[in-house]
Image (tube, grey):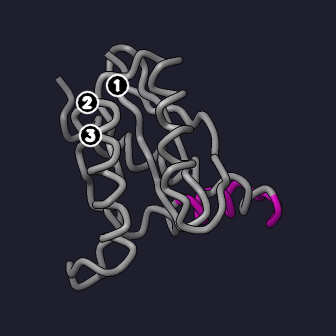
Amino acid sequence: MKILGLDLGSKTLGMAISDSLEIIANPIGTVRFSENDLQAALMATKKVVKEHDVKKIVLGLPKHMSGDIGVQAEYCLEFKKMLEKELSLEVVMIDERLTSQMAERVMLKADISRSKRKKNVDKLAATIILQTYLDIHSK
């Protein structure tokens, strides 16, 4: 079974996919859309789910450092409901605090240019979200 990891922003959706053994997460891309256009994000997700025979989705939940749920987290929860209704798949939420900063730090250490970092941060954050889930739920 393959699992899809998602990092949802207001204009981007980072995506990562697991291997069939559910051990390793690999980045597969970033979808860009008009601000808050969840329908475009849903259509892109639907396409990837079909192409990769995905059986579960892990979606990052951006909580505040205090653990409170803010506007962006509510946005992600709305997207979760859309995914479950449209795709009839289990959608697991995982705390994504600091994943984008971790992704940025990894790329800085790798001496990746600013423009490439900006282009890749969302799919790398999705990879971190998914890998965290895989590590916690390893068989």
In front of the other: 97 or 31: 31
Judge whether 55 appears above or below 91 on screen.
Answer: above
Q: Are marks 2 and 3 in contact (CB under 8 Å)?
A: yes
- Residue 22: image x %, image y %? 32, 23
Q: Is residue 16 magenta?
A: no
How far apart are the two marked residues, 2 and 1, measured between alpha carbons?
A: 24 Å
Q: Residue at x 24, y 77 (%)?
A: 69
Question: Looking at the picture, which amino acid does disc 3 mark?
Answer: Glu
In front of the other: 34 or 32: 34
Residue that mark 2 sits on: 88
In front of the other: 63 or 82: 82
Q: Is residue 139 left or right of residue 82?
A: left
Q: Secondary structure at mark 2?
A: loop
Disc 3 crowd rating (10 Å Cα; few below 14, some 14-19, many 20+) is few
Residue that mark 1 sits on: 23
Q: Secondary structure at mark 1?
A: loop
Magenta residues, start to end: 103-115
Q: Residue at x 27, y 39 (%)?
A: 85
